[in-house]
Image (cartoon, grey):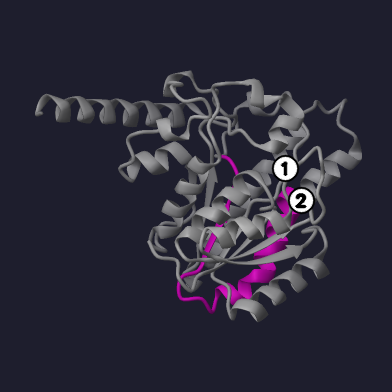
Amino acid sequence: MSLKDTVVFITGGSRGIGEAIAVRLAKEGASIAIAAKTADTNSKLPGTIHTAAKAIEAAGGKALALQCDIRDEEQVQRAIDQTVATFGHLDVVINNASAIFLESTEQTPAKRYDLMHNINGRGTWLVTKLALPHLKKSRNPRVLTLSPPLDMSPKWFEKTPAYTMAKYNMSMLVVGHAGEFAKHGIAVNALWPYTVIETAALNMISQSKSKPNLRTPEIMADAALELLSKPATFTGNLCIDEVVLREAGVRDMARYALTPGTRDEDMELDGFLGEADHARVAMLRKMHKSDTAAARAKL
């Protein structure tokens, strides 16, 4: 898919999954506005809007680095206005920015609760709302939010209820906006990883770098491109990266392993995944293994 002349506004894309998505879309010719808070180098958390912009340009895209706190309506409006002034229009919004605090109710300070809900739910709503007038004018408008399937099993709530609520708010907006914006031809979908993804932010809270059974952000980037390539009638879906890619014909997930040689079945699974998600992945893996075996038998 060529994304030439497509303008993408992505929140929190200074590092990790957001940056990987931005770079992947840039390789297809997209112009990318990176709206994130980090403008200065941090020794503990690498990546800024400026380093992300350089990576985008190195991949062949055009970049606009925008320091923006998505909790602030004026800053978001200014960032969107600058994007349209620079590139002429706006076609895709990617709600990537998110805050995380994995603790119980007793161990969660009110300020942490407020931070998660102001960034995750309110921030996603605000960015989408302020971008909407421009999306209505686009020939191929899309909204992609990085949030999980809505599994109401108590196990996702009983340990970290504040965080679960904050992420689910993002997913509920996907469902709501898909219906609300359908009359404008705006496709709204969500994307979530099947396995844990190694990122600098995750390393800060869990030392994931020492774990061999993770995947790289590139799997989310390729899945994001696939979702953005689908017709506008594909909307309101809460998607899983491996399912998206396997259903698109990608059989080999080994390329995304943080540690080469790690088997798919040995990867550490992400949260918020239900039995239906596991069954779908298992079925696709089995089908692709059968296809591969059949193809080898013919040689």
- 10 Å crowding of disc 2: few (<14), some (14-19), many (20+): many
- Gap between marks 1 and 2 measured at Cα: 9 Å
Q: Do the residues labelled 1 and 2 touch (CB within 8 Å)?
A: yes
Q: Give the labeled residue for mark 1.
A: 166
Quadrant assignment, res 291:
top left
Instruction: Return the residue nearer the eye: 204 or 289.
Output: 204
Q: In this view, does 115 lie above or below 234?
A: above
Instruction: Return the residue nearer the eye: 164 or 298.
Output: 298
Q: Give the labeled residue for mark 2.
A: 119
Looking at the picture, which amino acid does disc 2 mark? Ile
What SS does tag 2 mark?
Answer: helix
x, y (%) of residue 151?
57, 34
Magenta-drawn stretch contains 14:
no
Residue drawn at 69 percent across, 71 percent down: 80
x, y (%) of residue 40?
82, 53
x, y (%) of residue 100?
75, 38
The image shows a total of numbered marks equal to 2
Name of the residue lying farthest toward the front: 58
- 10 Å crowding of disc 1: few (<14), some (14-19), many (20+): many
Residue drawn at 37 percent across, 26 percent down: 282
Quadrant assignment, res 128:
bottom right
Residue drawn at 34 percent across, 40 percent down: 250
- The magenta span reads 119-148
Residue drawn at 57 percent across, 56 percent down: 22
Q: In this view, does 203 lie above or below 60?
A: above
Tell me the quarter of the image containing the C terminus.
top left
